[in-house]
Image: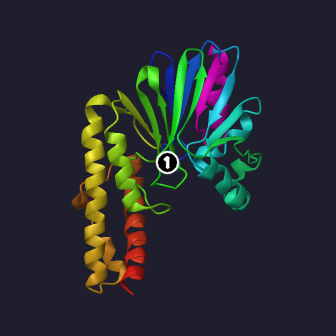
């Protein structure tokens, strides 16, 4: 696992085991705040040991940015911490979380010891703010990738944990493409120094505007291509010919996984547009 220091006391952990998913740590004199956990216990334990080396108070809060497995499966490793999320995240985990975990365990024995810990402190409008040790973390709903997605702004450091709202390729299969575009524009308008993506490299100040613009452009491009395919009656398989680069994104990030995300986006939009076309 890779660890990056992005401000005096803010660290990002990037997974080696699953899709370069990220987790954040904000260290303060009164304890630490963890933003998302990592899917496999081994890496979350590593993160926790790091915190314990630098903070006697340990982890006080864990924030879940949304309900997806790769961000919440490490929750149970912080029984001492308050667990925060949007109300919709709690509901989604209560509804589908256990079934998802049972299925995942069959595929991945490394998850056998994981149990689902559900956020107990939630908000459903406006912002939730945690003040701890001179830091204030502002949680706000940024829907699109999923309807429960939140971002977390560390105000003092102008660091935004945007979670899966900002990824090397926006991923809309479980969400809404128009809402993602609106949210990306909103995130792009925030005056921040760095953005921690839900997967992949941290975006630094000089990269933010361009990256967000290209993500919005990408989403508009795939909508255009898929709509044309649906309207001309082309079969779903024809989507394979719509390359990621043609839509303005690189095929390199996340060790090439972005190409699978791209194809899944196309398939999802195809189904969506086909329904509207009936
Ligand atoms: Zn994710």
Identify the secondary structure beneath mark 1: loop
Q: Is residue 133 above or below residue 103?
A: above
49 in magenta:
yes
In the image, is 90 to the left or to the right of 65? right
Please report the residue visible at 50 percent of the width from the left and 30 percent of the height from the top: 12
Quadrant assignment, res 58 = top right
Residue 202 lies in quadrant? top left
Looking at mark 1, is its residue's CB closer than 8 Å to ligand 1? yes
Residue at the front extreme, as displayed: 126
Mark 1: give few (<14), some (14-19) or many (20+) Cα within 10 Å: some
Residues drawn in magenta: 31-54
Say whether residue 232 is left or right of residue 269.
Answer: left
The location of residue 246, given as percent across then percent down, is 22, 61
Spot occupied by residue 28 in the image (x, y as percentages of width and height): 59, 16
The C terminus appears in which quarter of the rendering?
Answer: bottom left
Residue at 63% from the left image edge and 48% from the top image edge: 87
Q: Looking at the image, is 252 positioned above or below residue 274?
A: above
Whether residue 151 is visible: yes
User: Which residue is label 1 attached to?
Assistant: 19
For the point 26% across and 47% down, the residue is 213
* Residue 218 counted in the magenta span: no
């Amino acid at each position: 696992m890779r660890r990056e220091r992005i401000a005096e006391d803010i660290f990002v952990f990037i997974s080696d085991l699953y899709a370069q998913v990220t987790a954040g740590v904000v260290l303060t004199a009164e304890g630490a705040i963890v933003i998302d956990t990592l899917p496999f216990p081994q890496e979350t334990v590593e993160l926790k040991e790091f915190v314990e080396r630098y903070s006697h108070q340990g982890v006080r809060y864990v924030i879940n940015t949304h309900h997806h497995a790769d961000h919440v499966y490490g929750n149970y490793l912080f029984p001492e911490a308050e667990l925060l999320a949007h109300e919709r995240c709690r509901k989604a985990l209560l509804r589908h979380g256990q079934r998802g975990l049972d299925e995942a365990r069959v595929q991945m024995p490394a998850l056998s010891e994981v149990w689902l810990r559900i956020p107990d402190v939630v908000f459903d409008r406006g912002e939730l703010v945690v003040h701890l040790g001179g830091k204030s973390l502002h949680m706000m709903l940024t829907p699109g990738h999923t309807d429960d997605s939140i971002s977390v702004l560390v105000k003092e450091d102008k660091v935004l944990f945007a979670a899966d709202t900002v990824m090397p390729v926006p991923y809309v299969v479980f969400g809404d493409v128009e809402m993602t575009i609106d949210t990306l524009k909103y995130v792009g308008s925030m005056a921040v120094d760095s953005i921690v993506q839900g997967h992949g490299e941290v975006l630094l100040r000089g990269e933010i505007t361009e990256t967000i613009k290209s993500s919005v452009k990408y989403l508009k491009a795939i909508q255009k291509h898929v709509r044309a395919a649906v309207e001309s009656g082309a079969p779903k398989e024809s989507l394979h010919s719509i390359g990621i680069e043609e839509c303005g994104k690189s095929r390199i990030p996340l060790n090439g996984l972005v190409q699978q995300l791209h194809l899944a986006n196309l398939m999802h939009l195809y189904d969506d547009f086909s329904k509207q076309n009936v």
